[in-house]
Amino acid sequence: MDSGVYLMSHHIVEVKDLKYTYPDGTPALQGVSFRVLHGESVAIVGANGAGKSTLLLHLNGYLAPRGGDIRIGDYPLTRKTLQTVRRTVGMVFQDPDDQLFMPTVYDDVAFGPLNLGLPGPEVEKRVMTALSVVDTLHLKSRPPYKLSRGEKRAVAIASVLSMAPDILVMDEPTSDLDPRARRKLIELLKTFKHTKIIATHDLDMVVDLCERTIVMFNGRVTADGPTLQVFENQAVLAESHLEKPLGMQGCPVCSGSARDKGAQ
């Protein structure tokens, strides 16, 4: 095996025939399979109830599948490998309040590195770097509950970046953000060069950020391919209860990013 491929194998996510049923008997995932390679930026899209969030919660072991397999790099996802996988896969939840629970922003961002057993100077370095990356260093002494929604989102991302993950998994990252905060987040995510898997309803962000899109409906993958090709497929969109992103609907104000993406 080529040494470069081997070194990057820990960035690969492989899901095979994944199945999950909620305790009330409702099927959530029905044989989901896909493979994400190092450096890919992949969107998971679909209508409410498609299974997007449930899928993401499997990728670092918050939920255990009822069938199928997940591999993160060289490791099958099992109880024995859970801690190793969670060092590799950084998860940003849909609601940042689910991730922020310490007295200050600094404490929240330091929580993960401290749990890794890192020495104090390394923890401080990681915290300051992560907060600088998301432009929230000035908030380090602030209680999280006093932050705006956009600030909370940024700090939640910093709390994951401080763990130095190889794979970034995000659930609805632009939800409830104002346009300026949304744009800042997209630009930030463009700087993350490792693997990104993002579940979202923000299809215009997908066009701007993700070169590949996986469409889900009723717990199944209904399409998987280059983003613009997927969003041009009216049959797939109709079947999955989705509409074409605004930027691809011919609006002269909105269509710039889609045009630019298609020209690349």
Image (tube, helix red, strand yellow):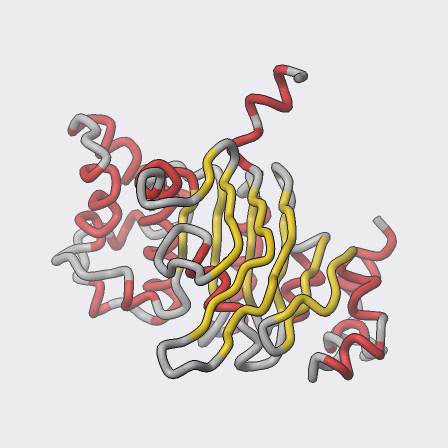
Q: Is residue 188 left or right of residue 5?
A: left
What is the residue that sits farthest to the left in this orientation?
103
Q: Nearer the viewer, residue 35 or 178?
A: 35
Q: Nearer the viewer, residue 39 or 261?
A: 39
Q: Nearer the viewer, residue 85 or 132?
A: 85
Residue that appears at 75% across and 62% down? 257
Residue that appears at 36% across and 43% down? 86
Residue that appears at 50% across and 77% down? 27
Q: Is residue 166 above or below residue 188?
A: above
Is residue 181 visible to us here? Answer: no
Q: Is residue 192 left or right of residue 214?
A: left
Q: Is residue 11 left or right of residue 210?
A: left
Residue that appears at 84% across and 78% down? 234
Q: Nearer the viewer, residue 232 or 181?
A: 232
Residue 96 location (% of width, % of height): 33, 65
Q: Is residue 129 above or below residue 43?
A: above
Q: Is residue 210 above or below residue 83?
A: below
Q: Is residue 49 above or below residue 85?
A: below
Residue 159 location (% of width, % of height): 31, 49
